[in-house]
Each structure stands twice: as C-alpha cells, then as structure tokens.
Image (tube, rainbow, N blue to C red):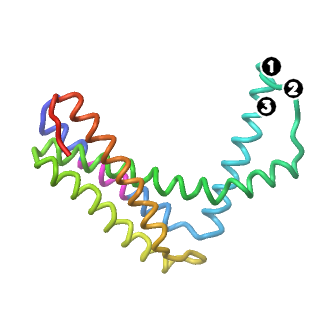
Amino acid sequence: MNKNVKTITTDILVLLCMFMIFSFSSMTSSSSNGDSKSIIKTSITDGINLANNINLIHRTISASSVDTLVANLNAPLRKCMHALEYMILAMLIFLLLHYLKVNNKLIICLAIGLCFLYSCTDEYHQTFIDGRTGQFKDCLIDTTGAIIGTITCNIYINKHTGKVSV
C-alpha cells in the first residue's frame, strides 16, 4: 500500500477513534450504564445458552444470579473499556507517526502524551453531561491502556523491521 494512502487512512482512523470516544462520553450516565449492563447481561445469557447447546455445561442460571453477576462485572468491565479505547487510539497514533517517519522515542512519547491529554479533555467534557463526572483516575486508566497499546505497537514494529529500540 502506498505511504500516502496508509497515512491518510490512519489519519481518518485516529479521528474516528477520537470521535467514538467523544460519542461514548456524550451519553448520559443512565444511558451509558444501562447499555453496559444490557450488553453484559446478553453476553452472560447467550454464553450460557451456547455452552448448554454444545453440551459444554448442563445448567441454568437464575435471573437473580445473572443480575448479581451483571452488577459485579459492570464497573470493572467499564474501566477495561476505558483502557481498550485508549489502547486502540495509541496504536493508531503510533502507526500514523511511524508512517510519517517520526523518531521512535518521540513516537512513544507523543502517542502516550496525546492520549493522556485527550483523556483529560474527555473527562472534562464529561462534567457537562447529565449524571457524568470527570475523574482523574479514569485518565490514569486511559493512559495505562495507551501505554499498553504503545508498547504492543513498538514490539510489533521492531520485530517486523528488525530494529531494536526503546
């Protein structure tokens, strides 16, 4: 693929990822939380049904047990999604800067730094949304995801280009 096409495509993906994060942050607390719980509940019930259908297990689970499981999983899974969003964003930024031939050490700093700054602005944005709060700990979770994404990209790029760097 042509370098310009890679750069433009990655530019677009970075912007789409940022827009997606902004859109999720624009949801009211009740809407966002309700969607998360609904997805978790569907995943649990569908997973149990699938496991029963393929004879992996032979059991049913009560609605109250599902609700308890959903309540226990909701907060940690939402935090994991925070990290995942920013892991993806960091990987896209890393690739974009790599295609632009930026120095590898600078790529690492910029990918993590830009994700941290975007996370801070995103948390601030949430203070204007009904039922949402901006929390610095979420910035730290987001940045952790960005660090993981950056390390992953760095390892992959170094392995496939034969370079050894930071």
In this rendered view, identify the residue nearer to me: 70 or 163.
Answer: 163
Q: Residue at x 30, y 54 (%)?
A: 15
In this rendered view, identify the residue nearer to me: 32 or 109.
Answer: 109
Image quadrant holding the N terminus, namely top left
Indicate yes or no whether the magenta region holds residue 14: yes
Q: Amino acid at mark 2?
A: His
Indicate yes or no whether the magenta region holds residue 32: no
Q: Amino acid at mark 3?
A: Asn
Q: Main secondary structure of the magenta part?
A: helix
- Using residue 46 as the reference point, say whether residue 154 is left or right of it: left
Quarter of the view holding residue 51: top right
- The location of residue 139, given as percent across then percent down, is 42, 67
Neighbourhood count class around disc 2 (C-alpha, 10 Å): few under 14, some 14–19, many 20 upward: few
Q: Are marks 1 and 2 in contact (CB under 8 Å)?
A: yes
Q: Residue at x 30, y 48 (%)?
A: 150
- Disc nearest the viewer among 1 and 3: 1
Above/below status of 40 relative to 60:
below
Pointer 2 residue = 58
In this rendered view, identify the residue nearer to me: 132 or 109.
Answer: 109
Q: Amino acid at mark 1?
A: Asn
Q: What's the CA distance linking mark 1 and mark 3?
A: 10 Å
Pointer 1 residue = 55
- Disc nearest the viewer among 2 and 3: 2
